[in-house]
C-alpha cells in the first residue's frame, strides 16, 4: 500500500533533491508532512504573486480618448476644475505657466473592493532640470473638487493620494532623487508637509524619471485585500517595476477618483492621457468578507513608517570623509613619529662620538 503511494508520487516528482529526501523518510506520516508543507509554501508564493484571474475595464470609472463631453456634458462622468482643459489627445491639468492649479474628478462614488488603476500621463516643459514644478497627484478621496496646497487639492484630505513630485523642496535629501513618486493615506488630521515633500507622512515610494520622458509614462495602483501596490513603467520597457507595496492599508469605499496638478514659481505641462479602472476578480475567504466596515482610512502598524527626524546617523559621504581624515591623521602622526625617531637615533649616535 505504502509502496504504491510512493511509486505514484515518485512519478510526479522530478527534482532530484526531493527524491533524495524522500528515500530517507521511513513512514508515510513524515511524507504527508512534507507534502503539506510544500503545498502551503506553494500556495503562499502563488498568493504573493497576486496573479489575478481576470480583470474587467469599468468604463464608468475610466477616463480615455475620446473624452466625449468631458467637463461640460451632463452625461460625462468627470468634472474639470481650475486650469484643466480637454484636447483630443489629453486632459491638460496645468499648462507650462506659473501658479496654475487644475484637476479632473470622477462624479461617481467608487465602491469596488479589488481594483487596479492604470494611469498614462505626461509631464514636460521648457524648464531645465530642477527648474520645474510642482507635480501632480492621483486621488481616491472622500472629498472632490477642492482647491488647496497639495498638488492643487486640499490639505487634510481623507483617502489615498499618490504624488508625482517633480521638485525637491526639502533642503536636505541625500537619499533620493527627483521626480519622486510617493503614497500618502490621509485621515483628515494628517497634514501634507510641502516643504519636506511629504516625507513624514509617506508610506512608500520610488524615484521615477518621468519628466520630458522619451517614452510613454504609466503608473499603476492596485488595491486588493488591504494591500496597496504602486508600479511604474517609465523607461519604455513595457513592463511594470515596483514602486511601493503597503500591506494592512484600510480604505473605506464611496470615495472619488481624481487627478490634480499644480505649478508655482516653476512650472510644467501636466497631462493625463488616460485613467483606466479595472475590477479584479479575487477569491475571497469568508474572513475577508466578515471584515469590519471602517469609516476612516488607516494603516496597521503606522509606527513602521515613522521617519527619524533626529540625526539620521552617518551617511556614506560622512563615512568616507571620516575614514579619509582618519587615514590622513594617522599618516601625519606616523611622519612625525619617524622624524622624532630619526632625531633620537642621530642624537644617540652623536653621543657615541
Ligand atoms: C490620523 O493618523 C495619525 C497618524 O497615524 C494619528 O496620530 C491620528 O490620531 C489619526 N487621526 C484620526 C482622526 O484618526
Ligand atoms: Ca516637492
Image (cartoon, rainbow, N blue to C red):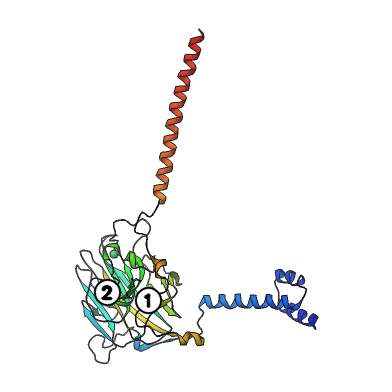
Residue 252 seen in this snapshot: yes
Question: Horizontal placement of 12 versus 159: left or right?
Answer: right
Where residue 134 sits, quadrant-wise, is bottom left
Give residue 82's position: percent from left, percent from top: 20, 77
Whether ligand 1 has any atom under 8 Å from the Cβ at mark 2 is answered as: no
Tell me which residue sits at (42%, 46%) in the image: 320
Name of the residue lying farthest toward the top = 353
How many numbered discs? 2
Give residue 140's position: percent from left, percent from top: 33, 80
Which residue is tagged 1?
298
Q: Are marks 2 and 1 in contact (CB under 8 Å)?
A: no
Quadrant of the displayed image that contains ligand 2: bottom left
Task: Tell me which numbered mark, 2 or 1, is placed earlier along the sequence.
Answer: 2
SS at badge 1: strand
Which residue is tagged 2?
156
Tell me which residue sits at (46%, 26%) in the image: 337
Give residue 221's position: percent from left, percent from top: 40, 76
Query: Is residue 343 positioned above or below 63 on the image?
Result: above
Question: Horizontal placement of 82 versus 299: left or right?
Answer: left
Tell me which residue sits at (77%, 76%) in the image: 27
Q: CA distance from mark 2 to mark 1?
A: 14 Å
Residue 205 seen in this snapshot: no
Q: Which quadrant is home to the N terminus?
A: bottom right
Whether ligand 1 has any atom under 8 Å from the Cβ at mark 1 is answered as: yes
Query: Is residue 70 positioned above or below 35 on the image?
Result: below
Query: Is residue 156 positioned above or below 265 on the image?
Result: below
SS at badge 2: loop
Question: Horizontal placement of 254 versus 74: left or right?
Answer: right
Give residue 104's position: percent from left, percent from top: 27, 80
Badge 2 density bin: few <14, some 14–19, many ≥20, Cα 10 Å = some
Amino acid at each position: 500500500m505504502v509502496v504504491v503511494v510512493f511509486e505514484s508520487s515518485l512519478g510526479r516528482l522530478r527534482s532530484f533533491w526531493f527524491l533524495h529526501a524522500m528515500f530517507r523518510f521511513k513512514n508515510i506520516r513524515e511524507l504527508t508532512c512534507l507534502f503539506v508543507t510544500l503545498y502551503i509554501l506553494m500556495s503562499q508564493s502563488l498568493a504573493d504573486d497576486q496573479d489575478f484571474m481576470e480583470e474587467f475595464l469599468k468604463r464608468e470609472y475610466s477616463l480615455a480618448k475620446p473624452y466625449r463631453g468631458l467637463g461640460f456634458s451632463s452625461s460625462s462622468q468627470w468634472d474639470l476644475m481650475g486650469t484643466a482643459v480637454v484636447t483630443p489627445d489629453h486632459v491638460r491639468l496645468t499648462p507650462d505657466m506659473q501658479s496654475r492649479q487644475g484637476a479632473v474628478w470622477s462624479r461617481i462614488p467608487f465602491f469596488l473592493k479589488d481594483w487596479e488603476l492604470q494611469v498614462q500621463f505626461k509631464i514636460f516643459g521648457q524648464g531645465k532640470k530642477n527648474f520645474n514644478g510642482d507635480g501632480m497627484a492621483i486621488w481616491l478621496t472622500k472629498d472632490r473638487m477642492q482647491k488647496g496646497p497639495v498638488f492643487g487639492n486640499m490639505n487634510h484630505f481623507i483617502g489615498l493620494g499618490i504624488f508625482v513630485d517633480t521638485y525637491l523642496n526639502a533642503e536636505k535629501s541625500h537619499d533620493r532623487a527627483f521626480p519622486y513618486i510617493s503614497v500618502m493615506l490621509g485621515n483628515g488630521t494628517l497634514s501634507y508637509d510641502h516643504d519636506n515633500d511629504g516625507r513624514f507622512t509617506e508610506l512608500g515610494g520610488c524615484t521615477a524619471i518621468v519628466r520630458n520622458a522619451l517614452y510613454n509614462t504609466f503608473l499603476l495602483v492596485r488595491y486588493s485585500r488591504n494591500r496597496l501596490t504602486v508600479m511604474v513603467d517609465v523607461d519604455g520597457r513595457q513592463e511594470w517595476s515596483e514602486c511601493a507595496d503597503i500591506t494592512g492599508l484600510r480604505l473605506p469605499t464611496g470615495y472619488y477618483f481624481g487627478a490634480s496638478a499644480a505649478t508655482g514659481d516653476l512650472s510644467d505641462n501636466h497631462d493625463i492621457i488616460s485613467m483606466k479602472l479595472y475590477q479584479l476578480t479575487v477569491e475571497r475567504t469568508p474572513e475577508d468578507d466578515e471584515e469590519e466596515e471602517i469609516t476612516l482610512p488607516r494603516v496597521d502598524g503606522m509606527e513602521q513608517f515613522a521617519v527619524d527626524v533626529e540625526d539620521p546617523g552617518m551617511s556614506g559621504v560622512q563615512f568616507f570623509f571620516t575614514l579619509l581624515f582618519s587615514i590622513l591623521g594617522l599618516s601625519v602622526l606616523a611622519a612625525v613619529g619617524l622624524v622624532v625617531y630619526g632625531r633620537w637615533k642621530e642624537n644617540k649616535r652623536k653621543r657615541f662620538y
